[in-house]
Amino acid sequence: MTQVLERREADAARGPMPNLLVTAPISATLLRLTTPNLISMLVTALVAICETMYVGLLGTIELAAIALVFPMVMLMQMLSSGAMGGGVSSAISRALGAGDEKRAATLALHALSIGAIAGISFTLLFNVFGGSIFYALGGRGAVLDTAIVYARVALSAAVLIWAVNTLASIVRGTGNMIVPSSALLGASLLQIAVGGALGLGIGPVPRYGIAGVAMGLVVGFSCAAIFLLWFLMSGRARITLRFSGVPFRREFFFDILKVGVVAALSPMQSVLTVLIVTRLVSSHGTEALAGYGIGARLEFLLVPIAFAFGVSCVPMVGMAIGARDVVRARKVAWTGALFSGVALGVIGTAVALLPDLWASLFTTDARVRGTADVYLHLAGPAFGPFGAGLCLYFASQGAGKVLQPVLATTLRLAFIIFGGWWLTAINAPLWALFALVGASLALYGISTILGVYLTDWTPTSMKPARMSARD
């Protein structure tokens, strides 16, 4: 503790350090921030790939079961990290951009309390209503029973998912991407090792099946939460998390929630979209559902890549807005969208042309692979605009102007609902439903780009006061 105090006294004697996030070249800075995020996100994607491979070895019923549960796990990730996490990073970065470190530290405690309440609420929700949710999605018989077994372990850790992603978002809001990325990287590696060992039974470790695979998530996130909490309380971060002497005030909750709550509507609608499609696909049989689960999982795995660029945009945009440099904030957003769109576009093109390279990783069942191949062939071309739109969703959080990207998600959901209803009414084949999904991804990306382009990011405090009629 003495060394920490001495270091802070030395820093104070040197005077305030220049904020490179508001002065350094945009492309180079964005790529520098994105690199650690991208590495940890790719390993996170590897977790999902390995988990699917584990489950594929257990059988087709297990694959179908995890297709029901996976959207719920991703909902936790997107809400806690992408939506509310973006609100946390946005509020903290705007405070730091304005030079108010005390406010940023106070916001951190408020953010953690929001994450704790949300995590406990979702843990209770899934423990009480999990079976009913999976039944409504089309789970029946052995598939439903297996989904419940997996969910009781994995989704009981919802509070851990919220804690880790909230703490990581606090650190990201300061412009530090290495520490949260390292924590998530470690959690991912633990999840792969523990989940594989307990799921399949390696050496002296008993085979616990799908419940063992889920235990990997619990162990990994527990360790990451402990590490990030220690880092923020140790004085090594730009702000220090304190649990005493900090009063809770409505304005600090509002600063986070005004972005986080609105932003949360986007992942909720995204998951609802996937759940609707999952329900429609389930009517075509277990093999179709398993194949769609393999194909749709790639779509979810692309989200972390766009996330890596997007969360790097949040502190850069937020600090620029806090420093009242709106022009730079928008340049950051468009640069990030370009990088993200190109990255996902390349992957989408590859899987559209060679879809079996992906599907063959998880199953040898010809019908399951055929379904996954059709999905990727039709949805892959839309991954590019989808990636650009998703990055702009995060950048808009940094500016505190997230409504337009959320409305784009609403438009996609409506497109799926009405399109799915029409295809069901005419008894259309499965490939037509997959074509609808691909079109909805492109629609989301294009409408988000247009929405951000037309939205004024100028803070209210920078706008001239309106003159009265008498003036």
Image (tube, grey):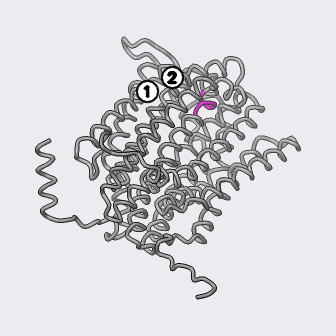
Front one among 395 and 461: 461
The residue shown at (32%, 42%) is: 182
Give above or below for 440 relative to 131: below
Front one among 122 and 249: 249
The residue shown at (74%, 51%) is: 414
Give the side of residue 285 with respect to residue 334, left or right.
right
User: In what element is the residue under mark 1?
Assistant: helix
User: In what element is the residue under mark 2?
Assistant: helix
Badge number at residue 306: none
Badge number at residue 218: 1
Residue placed furthest toward the right: 426
- Tell me the amino acid under the disc marked 2: Val
Give the side of residue 454 with respect to residue 98, left or right.
right
Q: Do the residues bearing badges 1 and 2 touch, measured as CB atoms within 8 Å?
A: yes
Name which of mark 1 and mark 2 comes first in the sequence: 2
Q: Which residues are magenta?
A: 66-70
- Tell me the amino acid under the disc marked 1: Val
Membership of 236 in magenta stretch? no
Q: For residue 127, which quarter of the picture?
A: top right
Give above or below for 15 relative to 144: below
The residue shown at (11%, 45%) is: 3
- Which quarter of the rendered picture does the N terminus lie within? top left
Q: Position of residue 462 (x, y in %)?
A: 46, 75
Q: Residues within 10 Å of mark 1 (few under 14, many from 20)?
A: many
Q: Give the CA distance from mark 1 to mark 2.
A: 8 Å
Q: Position of residue 382 (x, y in %)?
A: 63, 55
- Which quarter of the rendered picture does the C terminus lie within? bottom right
Front one among 42 and 164: 164
Residue tagged 2: 153
Q: For residue 268, which quarter of the picture?
A: top right
Give the side of residue 456 with respect to residue 47, left or right.
right
Q: Position of residue 394 (x, y in %)?
A: 50, 56
